[in-house]
Image (cartoon, rainbow, N blue to C red):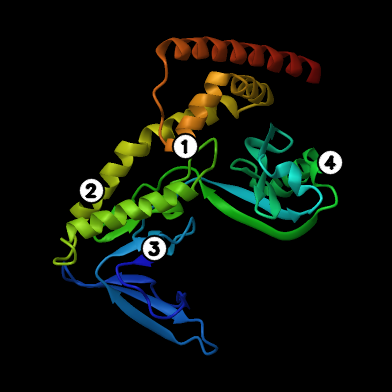
Amino acid sequence: MLTSATAPHRRSFCHQRPFLENGQSKNAPYVLHYTTTTRKGAPGEEDYGSVIGADGANSRVAKGINAGEYDYAIAFQERIISDEKMKYYENLAEMYVGEDVSPDFYGWVFPKCDHVAVGTGTVTHKGDIKKFQLATRLRARDKIEGGKIIRVEAHPIPEHPRPKRVLDRVALVGDAAGYVTKCSGEGIYFAAKSGRMCAEAIVEGSENGKRMVEESDLRVYLEKWDKTYWPTYKVLDILQKVFYRSNPAKEAFVEMCADEYVQKMTFDSYLYKRVVPGNPLDDLKLAVNTIGSLVRANALRKEMEKLSV
């Protein structure tokens, strides 16, 4: 968690008393209660003029301001190292789609320096996450065979922003605010960017520390954020709802991704983290091709349903 001052000692936060409190007057400081990570674990508290909650999807700062809940996916991954196989992944990342690896997300093999992260995620079937992980590992079996699992991880991925992201002199950023994109599940860039934008709003609003910031100062950060990135979140939300709903729809998605224009637009949008305007004629062609892919996918789904009866 980031605050308006740097805490002098490493510490965890106390569970026996309220984590975040503020005084009765308008400009009263926020009081953060904590427990030090020394052997005795002594409780303590510190005062801050403003607080930026950057403490992840299970944010205690968010709970402290009653920011509301959100849907979330569970991501599960294993870090696997295999010196002989790493050359294959030097310049390659893989994504797998299909109801075997996830009914509503995707599986992945992402290179991480000297090892790969093999994982998957789901919103709708969290209890089956280990089954989906096994299927993902089976999909990539030939390329990771012989590898040693060096770490197993699981964590929540927010599915949309929290209902409340600013209250008084407290603001949420990153996963704490729910800034993870649909379809791709990306959050690292948006965590860093939102933290920077919020800090800049505090510096500007406080006139470089000359006055106490107010909620209106922090809302400047929200307005800039929503104006800049809301279209990106909306487009990716639509893509996930359209293409991740069934195996045939996912096949249509894969077919669409084979188009060079789609690849270029995707690369540009990913690079700049915004929806990049395209060529109107190419956009029209893409729309026609996408509709065709979805029609074929729907026909395939109906045939599969007949065979399963």
Q: Which residue is mark 3?
A: 61
Q: Is residue 178 visible?
A: no
Choose mark 2 or mark 1, whichever is in front: 1
Amino acid type at mark 1: Leu
- Between 134 and 210, the one lying in front of the other is 210
Q: Are marks 4 and 2 in contact (CB under 8 Å)?
A: no
Other-residue count near label 2 (Cα within 10 Å), few / some / many at <14 / 14–19 / ≥20: some
Q: Is residue 259 visible?
A: yes
Q: Is residue 275 above or below residue 24?
A: above
- Coordinates of residue 228 in the picture (x, y in percent): 33, 38
Local SS, label 3: helix
Q: Which residue is mark 2?
A: 220
Q: Are marks 4 and 1 in contact (CB under 8 Å)?
A: no
Q: Which mark is residue 16?
A: none
Q: Quadrant of the C terminus?
A: top right
Q: Quadrant of the N terminus?
A: bottom left
Give the alpha-carbon distance from disc 4 to disc 3, as whole Å: 44 Å
Q: Which residue is mark 4?
A: 142
Choose mark 4 or mark 1, whichever is in front: 1
The disc, 4 or 3, on the residue closer to the chain's N-terminal end is 3
Give the alpha-carbon distance from disc 4 to disc 2, as whole Å: 51 Å
Q: Are marks 2 and 3 in contact (CB under 8 Å)?
A: no
Relative to 221, 130 lies left or right: right
- Coordinates of residue 55 in the picture (x, y in percent): 44, 61
Relative to 219, 299 lies left or right: right
Q: Which mark is residue 271?
A: 1
The disc, 4 or 2, on the residue closer to the chain's N-terminal end is 4
What residue is at 66 percent from the left and 47 percent from the top? 111
Q: Is residue 82 above or below residue 108?
A: below
Give the alpha-carbon distance from disc 4 to disc 1, as whole Å: 31 Å
- Between 120 and 115, the one lying in front of the other is 115
What residue is at 70 percent from the left and 50 percent from the top? 116
